[in-house]
Image (cartoon, grey):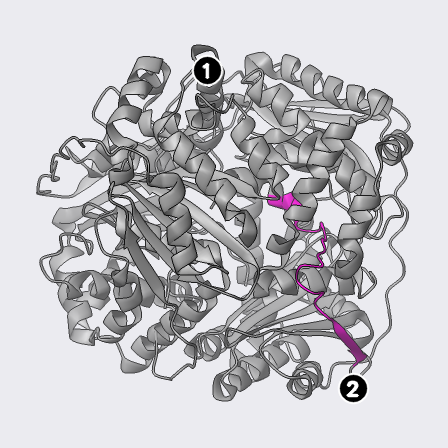
Amino acid sequence: MSAKSLMRIFGLALLLAASQVLAGPKIQHWTGANGSRVYFLPTEGLPLVDVRVVFDAGSARDGQQFGVATLTAGVLDTGAGSWNADAIAQRLEGVGARLSTGVSRDSAFLTLRSLTEPKLLDVALSTAHEILVNPTFNPADFEREKKNLLVGLKQREESPADLAGIAFFRTMYGDHPYAHPKDGDIDTVEKLTRDDLERFYRQYYVAANALVVIVGDVDRAKAQSIADGLLAGMAAGGAPPAIPEVPQPASANSVKKAFPSAQTHIYSGLPGMKTGDPDYFPLYVGNHILGGSGLVSKISDEVREKRGLSYSAYSYFYPYRQLGPFMMGLQTKNETAAEALKVLQKTLGDFIAKGPTDKELTASKQNITGGFPMRLDSNQKLAEQVASIAFYGLPLDYLDTFVQKVEAVTTADIQRAFKARIDPARLQTVMVGAGDADKPAR
Amino acid sequence: MLTLRRLGCLMLAAPFAVQAAPPKVSEFKLDNGLKILVQEDHRAPVAVSQVWYKVGASYEHDGITGLSHMLEHMMFKGTEKHPPGEFSRIISANGGSENAFTGQDYTAYFQTLEKSRLKVSFELEADRMRNLKILPAEFDKEHQVVLEERRLRTDDQPRAKLAEQFDALAYSNGPYKNPVIGWPDDVAGLTVADLTEWYRQWYAPNNATLVVVGDVDPQEVYQLARKFFGPLKPSVLPPVKPRSEIEQLGIRRMIVRVPAKLPYLAMGYKVPVLKGAAEEWEPYALEVAAGILDGGNSARLESRLVRGQQIAAAVGAGYDLYSRLPSLFMIEGTPVQGKTLQFLEKALLAEVRKIQDEPVAQEELDRVKAQVLASKVYERDSIFYQAMQLGTAETVGLSWKTVEEYVDKVNAVTPEQIQKVARKYLVEDYLSVGYLEPLPIPEGTVAPEDRAPQGGQHVR
């Protein structure tokens, strides 16, 4: 509900944190009956369980069929086994369960939240099992979901923020599989067929490419039966090839797209870091000072607090399997777009040239470590943390060591890491708003 | 299933028993009138603290709309004791996260902290409850920030623009006709003097509720609150005028034409809410009616109009029974390509008619109630959400106890009651309809500079 923080959740979702305060949640890990990887964290206090099944089947696996990963995930729960969409929805909602599917650039996922009462949980799990293992890809459901996706893609085109985000990724990633929007483009989605989805499903929704995360008020034996039951009968398959490395742009680039809006939306950045990156901590803590800590960050201070130029101004590293984006962003009335961009880039340039002060570093460490318990204060947040650790192969004690790794970061580490990763002379910049279009964004 | 942006989907309650100890709320009141609500949740060593003021956009009158929201922004800009920006720096250095939000019926401020830091929050909130210093230079900058917020949230968003103009159509004299962020000229015309007076009138312990949820001991919270908030002086509060909306005497229609890609339809019926309801069961029956229409993928709108007839790409129904004044039962949708807004409107009206004409099947009702019950458990996973519910109920003039009664009251709703409220309130004479008709988005043109803002909740 907080728009200010929501804008940042984009960046925060993958930032993993740690605390000794919580006495280290102990993640249990094993290999399931058919070869899938299982991660389990028991919790107490509420009679509910969060289950996530994650596949390496995000939009980076689209090939040239941009949108196929999104549409595949979207069609899964519209028909499975002997049930149509109505029957599936009635089964789940009749027991108060919540199920959703979706994709990121790296992954496809099914999330299920259910009460733990066995009568209810069993219905929820057996429904999720059919969706995962026996989806029917009924042609009528496929056509409808495709049309509705196309409506959604059209809606993006009335949002300068969405258009700017899409253009920014294209500019930054070129031909890399991270370049296209995760939901695809209108022309590529129009060409998708039902068989394309089934083919995508058969290749990627396989046990060797799956992991199951279970966080909730169940015991280990129950967790084992949940994991084995969910994927029972799923083809073993194989792991997909690695996502290619991301090349760094050779030089700075600036794209402007005219749009009849009162504000210009600006993104500026570069491919930044990977999950599990050796420079993760210096970059994360450094960015917290630069633009990742809300109103007290340097970028927000310069753009909003000192000059009143934007409601929201920030920077983030968003780690992916390969180099994910480092992005700075703001929105401002068209007349002050050039000024705001200058302030944004100067703030970055000064930060890289001078590095943070000891005082700034201390303040950020206090916020990160003092706020650590809040990253693990709900079942849902724990499930998200465990899923990230599992999917990106981070150590199972990641949360136990997080705080000490943050504490170990020095101002010199930050300056070195930023200098190595972010070359201000190569920034990729996109502006969408009123004004002269010197080059149409794609 | 792929879902487009839709109205927040509701709730749900149930025919099965679920074992979860009900959360316990402790209530206190200080001599100066500050009410304190504490709910224990010991799952993590964390606490959320929220200060709710009984003031918001619906307390404003013409010409000063947006004042409550602008004041909310200035609440971060310093007191006698703390210079501008220090509030946020202190919270940050304590590991906390903070924000604030303004609605029609409230202005609220919150911090989430490790539990031992709760006193940091109390000390700062108590200070800015009575000692705010609105500096002209800070006001000038923040004024610009709020104008940018308007552009971001309303001016450049076709549906938000429709929503803003829709409220102005649906309400004639009631204060919900005005957007929370304020009308453009009103916002531009706000002054330091306006804010100072508004602050003096409404920011006092006897107009506030402190809500704490988390790993805390209620008695300790009370003692801590007494220490920091106890010395504050109460105010003589201005009387709140009733400003009841006049009776609507026939359907109202509007068209909003803006550059956009998709047509969009909004429909709203004037309905009662819990506060001031003549019959207490009526709002709960409306709540269940909203669930029958839009309580998930199995509910009628999704299964009949998105899947069955394939008229809508997205649909939603929404009703909020926790507001200070009667509000709207909303239905909205986006037609599929090739279908018109008129066609979609007819289909939605036909669904409303079915609720009036035929009793809801028991199985359908059970499904709605099952979801209500499960949701009650799920929402306890968030201490913030729990605090929100208590604060909202208390601030709109209901007791927090109404939050506890919710599941039982929803469970008591019968098929006949749903039919009754649908026949009484979901009728043409109480309906407003808004169409968003897209204009082409021209390439390379320059947009008009400033336009209007939007309703709903505004966050700093």
Does B270 sit left or right of B48 as displayed? left
Residue B328 in the image: above or below residue B89: below
Q: Which residue is drawn at 25% across and 62% down?
A: B402
Q: Which residue was labeled with disc 1?
A: B449
- Quick one: SS at disc 1? loop
- Quick one: SS at disc 2? loop
Mark 1, chain letter? B
Number of marks: 2
In the image, residue B275 lies at what x, y percent? 18, 52
Residue A235 in the image: above or below residue A170: below
Residue B348 in the image: above or below residue B58: below
Tell me the number on the disc at residue A245. Answer: none
Q: Are marks 2 and 1 on the same chain?
A: no
Asked whether A70 or A362 is in front, the reply is A362
Asked whether B242 or A226 is in front, the reply is B242
In the image, residue A26 lies at what x, y percent? 73, 71
> Marks 2 and 1: which is nearer the front?
2
Q: Which residue was labeled with disc 2?
A: A33
In the image, residue A422 lies at what x, y percent? 85, 30
Measure the C-alpha gap from mark 2 to mark 1.
62 Å
Q: Which residue is drawn at 25% across and 48% down?
A: B323
Q: Is residue A18 magenta?
A: yes
- Residue kind at label 1, given as amino acid type: Glu
Q: Residue at x 26, y 73 (%)?
A: B408
In the image, residue B355 lies at what x, y percent? 22, 67
